[in-house]
């Protein structure tokens, strides 16, 4: 029932947005560089401007904003231009109606709230996704799953992660990696996917560097978890070829929201290009030979594995009830 109401509400908001965004280009509100303009349909897919379903979109970023391949501890990661985080706590009218939309193309996490006939942007954060682009198919494929607005994921648990550690196998040993919170997502067909901080890996946000989870800056995961997130909250992770939804275009225009990144999906790097491009030098992997011998002992029943590392089975604070379990991926 709750899901059908959510979908119905978004459909109504999309219809309103189509009417609202069909006029002349709002040059005053679209401060995104000198990129070309584009059009989308109700599903956020790019279409020809003369298409009957075309909705005028926001212009793409200029050529100065791009994806760059950086060799970070031996992994080919993506880095891009960071943006300013936004958080409008005073605009929230009903916390239970908030929902999340993430763009795998533009490296943003947005929080929205339907308010009457409009949708209001409540918060925006830079984020980092998996090392590889595309839909997640199996555990360990280094991809972040995506969904459609008609079949969204949702927040399953909100747990304290301030003491959680992970061994990335890069010589640093077990280090804090998750920020203060881990928002476990229910992603049918896959487990262990969540939204968390980037402790000791702040450089990776925004971009691509994780094993499948979504990373935010530590201060942003704290803001999201403490002010906006609730268990059961709807979460939409858009595929790399999906652009802004009509209600997003309308909200950004109406609220005069500026952003630095808005990529043309046809011009972003492919997995093949990432694998062969000349990479900039990032952090360098060090030897593991000095690792303490006790790290090689068998894992006890009180410990849980996370992506090949180990995390103490902490009794973290759990908001909203439910069983606390450690994430499978980071």
Image: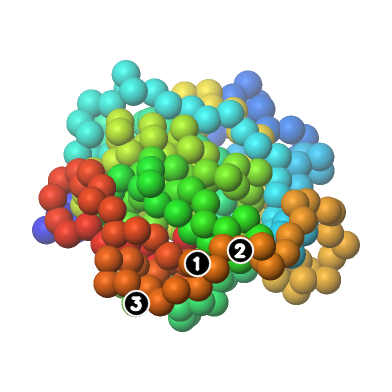
Comparing marks 2 and 3, which lies closer to the viewer?
A: 2
Left or right relative to 305: residue 203: right
Q: CA distance from mark 1 to mark 2?
A: 7 Å
Q: Nearer the viewer, residue 38 or 287?
A: 287
Residue sitting nearer the eye, 110 or 46: 110
Which residue is label 1 attached to? Answer: 295
Q: Earlier in the sequence, mark 2 or mark 3?
A: 3
Location of residue 219 with respect to 165 vertically, above or below: above
Q: What residue is at 72 percent from the left and 64 percent from the top? A: 287
Q: Secondary structure at mark 3?
A: loop
Q: Residues within 10 Å of mark 1 (few under 14, many from 20)?
A: few
- Circle 3 residue: 189
Residue drawn at x 27%, y 66% is 302
Q: Is residue 201 visible?
A: yes
Q: Which residue is mark 2?
A: 291
Figure quadrant of the N terminus: bottom left
Kind of element beneath mark 1: helix
Residue drawn at x 73%, y 60% is 286
Which disc is residue 239 wearing? Answer: none
| SS label for mark 2 | loop
| Residue sitting farthest toward the bottom | 138
Task: Give the answer, above or below, for where 264 lies relative to 85.
Answer: below
In the image, farthest residue toward the front: 293
Query: How far is disc 2 from disc 3 in space, using C-alphas?
Result: 36 Å
The percent coordinates of residue 251 (x first, y second) are 44, 33
Q: Is residue 10 visible?
A: no
**What is the x, y in percent for residue 62?**
77, 39
Cβ–Cβ under 8 Å for marks 1 and 2: yes
Left or right for 63, reference 121: right
Left or right of residue 28: residue 91: left
How many numbered badges does the structure rendering display? Answer: 3
């Amino acid at each position: 029932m709750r899901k059908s109401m959510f979908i119905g509400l978004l459909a109504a908001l999309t219809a309103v947005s189509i009417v609202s965004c069909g006029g002349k280009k709002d040059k005053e509100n679209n401060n995104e560089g000198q990129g070309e303009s584009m059009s989308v349909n109700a599903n956020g897919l790019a279409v020809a401007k003369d298409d009957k379903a075309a909705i005028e979109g926001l212009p793409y970023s200029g050529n100065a904003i791009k994806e760059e391949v950086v060799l970070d501890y031996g992994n080919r990661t993506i880095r891009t231009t960071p943006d300013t985080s936004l958080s409008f706590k005073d605009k929230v009218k009903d916390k239970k109606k908030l929902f999340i939309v993430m763009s795998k193309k533009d490296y943003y996490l947005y929080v929205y709230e339907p308010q009457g006939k409009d949708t209001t942007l409540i918060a925006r954060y830079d984020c980092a996704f998996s090392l590889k682009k595309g839909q997640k198919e199996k555990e360990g494929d280094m991809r972040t799953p995506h969904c459609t607005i008609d079949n969204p994921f949702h927040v399953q648990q909100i747990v304290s992660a301030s003491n959680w550690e992970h061994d990335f196998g890069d010589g640093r040993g077990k280090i804090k990696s998750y920020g203060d919170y881990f928002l476990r997502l229910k992603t049918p067909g896959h487990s262990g996917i969540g939204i968390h901080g980037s402790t000791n890996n702040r450089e990776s946000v925004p971009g691509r560097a994780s094993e499948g989870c979504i990373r935010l800056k530590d201060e942003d995961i704290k803001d999201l978890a403490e002010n906006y997130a609730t268990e059961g909250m709807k979460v939409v992770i858009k595929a790399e070829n999906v652009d802004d939804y009509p209600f997003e275009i309308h909200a950004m225009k109406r609220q005069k929201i500026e952003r630095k990144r808005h990529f043309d999906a046809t011009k972003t790097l492919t997995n093949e290009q990432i694998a062969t491009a000349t990479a900039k030098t990032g952090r360098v992997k060090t030897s593991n030979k000095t690792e303490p011998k006790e790290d090689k002992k068998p894992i006890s029943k009180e410990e849980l594995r996370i992506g090949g590392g180990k995390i103490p089975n902490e009794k973290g604070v759990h908001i909203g009830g439910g069983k606390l379990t450690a994430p499978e991926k980071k």
